[in-house]
Image: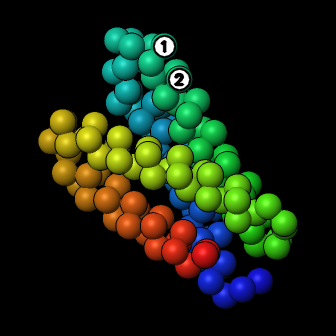
C-alpha cells in the first residue's frame, strides 16, 4: 500500500465509527428532538448518515486491502461526508453550539487533505 493511502483509510474507519457513536449518544441521551417533531425527515437523515458511515468504513478497509475500486468508493463516501459536515455545521451554528461547528470544519479540512493524499 502506498504510504499516502494509510491516513485516508485510517481516517475513514475512525470517522465512520465516530459517526455511529455520535448518533447513538445523541439518540440515547434524548438530544434529537426531531424524532418527535420531524420523524420522517430525521429518519431519512439518519439513513443517509448511516450509509455514509458504513461506506466510509467499508471503502477504507478495501483501501487498506488494496482492492481495485477502493479509491473510487472512498471518494464517493468522502463526498457524502463533505456534504454532511457542511450541513451539520450549519445546523449546530443555528443552535449556537460553536464547538461542534469548529469540530466539523476541522473534519472537513482533514477529509479534503485525505482526498488530496489519495490522488
Is 41 located above or below residue 106 in the figure? above
Number of numbered discs overlaid on the protein picture: 2
Residue sitting at the far left: 96
The C terminus lies in which quarter of the figure? bottom right
Q: Residue 40's mark? A: 1
Is residue 96 found left or right of 34 in the rendered image?
A: left
**Residue sitting nearer the eye, 41 or 35:** 41
SS at mark 2? Answer: helix
Percent of width and height locating residue 111: 47, 64
Task: Find the distance from the CA under tag 1 to the CA under tag 2.
Answer: 6 Å
Kindly indicate whether the residue at mark 2 contacts the one at mark 1 (C-beta within 8 angstroms). yes
Is 95 located above or below residue 104 in the figure? above
**Residue sitting nearer the eye, 35 or 5:** 5
The N terminus lies in which quarter of the figure? bottom right
Mark 2 is surrounded, within 10 Å at the Cα level, by few (under 14), some (14 to 19) or many (20 or more) other residues, namely: few
Residue drawn at x 79%, y 61% as measured from the top left: 69
Percent of width and height locating residue 28: 47, 31
SS at mark 1? Answer: helix
Residue sitting at the far bottom: 3
Is 51 located above or below residue 104 in the figure? above
Task: Determine which residue is flagged by label 2.
Answer: 44
Amino acid at each position: 500500500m502506498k504510504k499516502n493511502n494509510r491516513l485516508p483509510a485510517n481516517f475513514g474507519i475512525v470517522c465512520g465509527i465516530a459517526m455511529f457513536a455520535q448518533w447513538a449518544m445523541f439518540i440515547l441521551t434524548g438530544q434529537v428532538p426531531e424524532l418527535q417533531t420531524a420523524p420522517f425527515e430525521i429518519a431519512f437523515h439518519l439513513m443517509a448518515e448511516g450509509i455514509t458511515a458504513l461506506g466510509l468504513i467499508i471503502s477504507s478497509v478495501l483501501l487498506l486491502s488494496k482492492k481495485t475500486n477502493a479509491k473510487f468508493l472512498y471518494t464517493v463516501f468522502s463526498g457524502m461526508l463533505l456534504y454532511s459536515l457542511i450541513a451539520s455545521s450549519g445546523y449546530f451554528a443555528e443552535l449556537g453550539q460553536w464547538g461542534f461547528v469548529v469540530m466539523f470544519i476541522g473534519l472537513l479540512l482533514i477529509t479534503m487533505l485525505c482526498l488530496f493524499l489519495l490522488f
